[in-house]
Structure formats: structure tokens, C-alpha cells
Amino acid sequence: MSATSAHRLLRGALTLVVMVAATMFGATAAHAAAPRLKLTALAFANDTVDATGDYASNKLTWTVTNTDPEAGSIFGTVTMRMRSTVTGELVGHDLVARYAYQETCCGDGVYESGTPQESTYSFDLPVRAYSDADTAIWEVTKVTIGSHGTTATVSGTRLQAFGYRFTARTLIDSSGPSADSISLSSPVRRPYFYVGNGAATVTYDFTVQDGQSGFWKGTIRLAGPGGASVTTAFTWERDEYSTGLRCGRVTGGQQDGIYMPCVLDVTVPADAAPGNWRVAALVLRNNAGGTTTYKNPTAPSVTTTTNSTVRASDFAIEPNPVDNWRDSVMTDITMVVTDTRKGLSTVQLDLVGGCQQWGLPTTRADGRVAVKVMVYQQTAQCEVEGLAVIDGAGNVALYGSMYGAPDPDLTITRVPSTEPPTARSASLDPSSLPVSEVGQTSIKLTIDADVKVAPITGVSVYVYDVNGEVVSQSGGGSSQAPDGTLTAWLYLPWWQDLPAGAYTVGFELSDAARNSTAWNMPDRSDSRTLPGGPVVLTLTAAG
């Protein structure tokens, strides 16, 4: 054999070995990477159940397997529905039992036994007492299995190999659900919605009741201008992480929808026809398939706008800022209103801060519309969050963040105060006192101070001995009179013997703007000296 032939034979043998090894390892890797999840058993305890009494249930037991030997958990859901023996259709809200390896609580599927590779669970299905006939069928419609990112679903005809269904004797539900009054949900303050920048969300609040089979689902339809309409479907769902039931925005109600509060968002599309939108129909269906239709129910209507009819512009605040340091004051929100039909009906303000709309709008001689606003004492800022202009024909123009509408940029502010209090003089009454009367006599301190933008609201008084040590201090709120004077009181310590001699009285003034100044206080480097000199209290030995 030539060297070349021998080389070719050896290369072929090596290639064969590599291919065999690749095939073997590939098969092992593929087997390990693809664990199989399987439903191996499922059955109800009873083929028939009598649900015409107070309470009935039927225990469902199932077993799932996982071929992954490394798996440490397994979980999933079992979904059950009622089927009408009249129509043959699945009706009513599904019941979903969640299960997980070693989980034994919380009203869901209960772990019975086994390992993550093969485990058994059970669930006591509460059987409804009512259906649309004297019998109904319950069946498992779907089983899901999950473990470490791998999932499997068993549904449809694949469930028919198991004991997936049973028959229940039931009472006949001959009526549909009922609903109480429909209202706009809080925190809506005005029934107006701006759709010029995008869709608007209208939220309705009502409660559905069905004391027999329970509420299942429904629709609410709004009718708008020119034949426009919006229909929103709704039902209740179980919260993902609890046993609570949710209908729209609210959690509450009783199991199976016997009693169910609902707070629903209805979306009115962007650029919807401006005008009045009303609740044209509320359709409710119960778990037995019974239907109740409320046509034109009593409910608040809403108005949408793109500000394409009546308009407001050139907004202003007159005066602004306001001096409300000492009392509440009035100011005007003014604007130019155009394109009204049947005149101007009203302007409604929504204000954030210590202020309030005061009365109805007026039209001034210059044609501007003015709305008075009361700004309460010492309110630092008040913002117009929403502004609605309504004409006599019911057309609306909206402005402000509350409506998601154009910003009128209206913020009422307070006149700033940056100058600290200034004292001109001070006096004591009495200015002299026998030491024997210390603690028995109140000493009045009268301070004369400049009247500035912000009033003085507090006085702290300090009494110093000859060594500059504080022997008494007091303080609290104080009111500055129109002439600038204010009073405070010295309270000398009766429990300690103060020697006769001269005592300096110092004080600190603070105003409503949180500015402050110190006067005749030897222990403060920022203390100022009164123009008339220090205030001195003399204690005498006589008396």
C-alpha cells in the first residue's frame, strides 16, 4: 500500500469516529435541552352532582410529569367552564385554579403528593346552583404546565381522553343581572373632555348584582353627535396575586359575580365629534347566559371638545402678584372669548392652592371676560389647573392640565417679601421691680417696628444678667398692629433667687415670610442694637 493510500484510509477512519461521536453527543444534548411536560391523569370524583341544595362541589384530581431530572418545581393552571345543555355553548365566567409544587393554601389547586418529575394536585370545584336548564355540564377546558421556561398546554380534544367533565343538576335562572345607578367616577370634577390632542378616558362607576347564577360580562355603549358611538366590553377578573376579583379599576365583590362593583374606562377617540355623549345602552349577561339590557339608562352625559367652536385666548391675571400677607384679597382671571353661540353661559375654574372662584363671570367694557378669584391670606401660589368656557348652546372650550388641554399659563403668586423685620424702639412696663415680686408680676414688652410687606408674626424674648447669661426666655406668636407695634411678656423664674441689679432684655422678631432679626442679644453675633439703646429691667432689693 502506498503512503498516500494509507494516509487516505487513516483520514477516513478518523472522520467516521468524529461523526459517530458528534451524533452521540448531539443526541444527548438535544435530549437534555428539551424536557417534556405532560398531563398523565385527570378526573372528577363524581360523574353527576346535585347542585340544587345549599352548596355543592366536585373534586378534580390531576397528575403532571416532567422528564427533566434536574427540575425543582412545576406549576400551572386548570381552567373549568360550564356548558349549556340547551344551546351546547360554553357559558359563564371560567374558573381558574392555579397550582404549584408543594403549594397547599390559598383556595387554589392543592398539592397532594409527588416530586417535580411527577406530582398530583386537586381542586374542589364549586358548582353553580343555577343554569339555563335543570341540568348543566361542567368541563375542564384547558390545563397549562410550566417548569424552568418550558411550557405545555392541553386543551380541546386532547382532554377527552380523561374524565374531564361531569353533569350537574341545577335550578333554572330565569332572570338577568341588575345594575344600580351609573355615575361618573371620582376624581372627575367636570363632565368635560378634551380630544384635540388624543383620546379621552371617561370612567363610569356602577354595581352589578345577580343573586342566582352571578354576573358574567357586559358592554357599555356611548352615543355621540352625528350617530357616532363607542362600545366597551367588560367582565370581572381575578387579581393575579390574590383571591380578589377586579372589574375595571376596582377590586371587590363576591365570588362568581353575585355582587360586583365596576369602575370602567371608556375611551372616546381622538378628534371625536365635539358635543354631548350619553350612555345609550348597558348590556349585562349572567353566568347562565341570561341578559339584561338597559336602554338609555339614567346616567350623566359628558361633553367632548377640540376647542373648534367657542374659544378663549389672551389669558391674564389682574392684578398679579397679590398682596395677601395680612388678609384675603380678590384678583381677576381675564380672557377674550370668541365664537360663542347663544352668548356666554359660564366659565368654570379649577384651582390648586389656597384660592377659590368667586361668583359668575362678567364681561367688562373692553369686552374681556373676567372671573373673580378669592386668594386666601398668605397663600403663596395658586394655579389654574382647569378652565372651562361654556356658551349658551352647550359648546365647551377646555384649557389646563386637568383636561389634557392647552395650558392657559395662569398662576397667581404672592408679592415677595425679602426685607427682615426692623425694630425702632422697645419699652418695659414696669421697668423696675422688687426682687420679692419676681414671679408674681407680669412684665409687658412693647416693641415699635416698621410695617413692611410681610407682617411680624413671632417674638422670642431673652433676659440676660450682667455676665451675659440668659436667666429667662419666652416666646410665641404675636400680631403686629397697623401702627407697627406688638407686645410680648417677660416671665421671670420664681423658682430661683435673682439678685438685685440691671438685666438686659433682648428679643428676636420673625415675620410671615420666615425672615428674622435679633435685637440687643449679647450672645448673638448677628444681633442689632436698638436706636434707643438697650432695654433694661431693674430688680431692686427694696420691697
Image (spheres, helix red, strand yellow):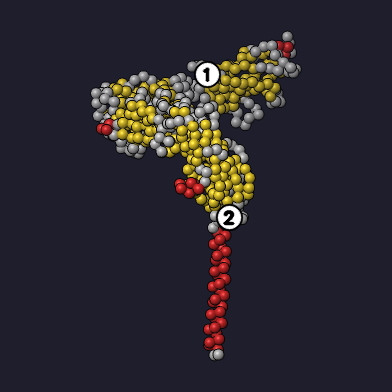
Q: Quadrant of the N terminus?
A: bottom right
Q: Position of residue 300 (x, y in %)?
A: 36, 25
Q: Position of residue 427 (x, y in %)?
A: 59, 16
Say which element carries label 1. loop
Of residue 204 and residue 377, the one placed in the foreground of this image is 204
Outermost residue toward the top?
A: 543
Outermost residue toward the front?
A: 47
Kind of residue at disc 1: Gln
In the depicted structure, whether residue 49 falls above or below residue 440: below
Q: Nearer the viewer, mark 1 or mark 2?
A: 2
User: Circle 1 is placed at which residue position?
Assistant: 480
Say which element carries label 2. loop
Residue at the image point whose x is 27% and y is 33% from the top: 227
Do we see residue 437 in this rendering?
yes
Q: Quadrant of residue 111?
A: top right
Q: Quadrant of residue 405?
A: top left
Of residue 495 and residue 501, the one placed in the foreground of this image is 495
The image's mark for residue 67 is 2
Do we see residue 251 in this rendering?
no
Of residue 354 and residue 510, the one placed in the foreground of this image is 354
Q: Position of residue 115 (x, y in %)?
A: 63, 49
